[in-house]
Amino acid sequence: MAYRIIQWGSGNVGAQVTAEVARRSDLTLKALFVYNPDKVGMDAGRVAGIGKLGVKATNSVEQILALDADCVIHAPLSSLVYGDDPEADLKTICALLASGKT
């Protein structure tokens, strides 16, 4: 059984993680969360610079929370560095855990 993965963030680290998840047979990419509105709806593989994966990028937190997945790889640029809410990452991670994801 493959672990169902959500990738949170599509920058340098997120793109590398997406590519590695796609390469592995024991992992299945279920979703890609993006911050850039221009990336919403794009294929996750295109966002990561690899071939098409059949998973569309989203910026909907509600959609991600509702998905049935095993694990979220949370790899955005830290809200401590980027953004106006230094606790944004903590709030996001708590919501993801509360939704049953690890």
Image (cartoon, grey):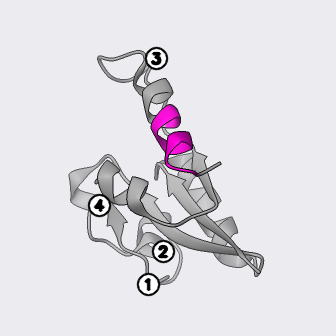
Question: Which of disc 2 and disc 4 is earlier in sequence?
Answer: 4
Q: Secondary structure at mark 3?
A: loop
Q: Amino acid at mark 2?
A: Gly
Q: Quadrant of residue 33?
A: bottom left
- Coordinates of residue 97 in the picture (x, y in percent): 56, 41
How far apart marks 4 and 3 lie (CA) works out to 23 Å
Give the secondary structure at mark 2. Answer: helix
Please state the extent of the stretch shown in magenta in the rendering.
Answer: 93-100
First in sequence, mark 2 or 3: give its number.
Answer: 2
Q: Is residue 79 magenta?
A: no
Rendered image: mark on residue 45? 2
Q: Is residue 36 left or right of residue 99?
A: left
Badge 4 crowding class, 10 Å Cα cut-off, few under 14, some 14 to 19, many 20 or more, is some
Of pointers 4 and 3, the one earlier in the residue sequence: 4
Q: Are marks 4 and 3 in contact (CB under 8 Å)?
A: no
Q: Which residue is mark 4?
A: 39
**Nearer the observer, 72 or 56:** 72
Q: Return the residue nearer the eye: 98 or 47.
A: 98
Amino acid type of the residue tagged 3 in the rendering: Leu
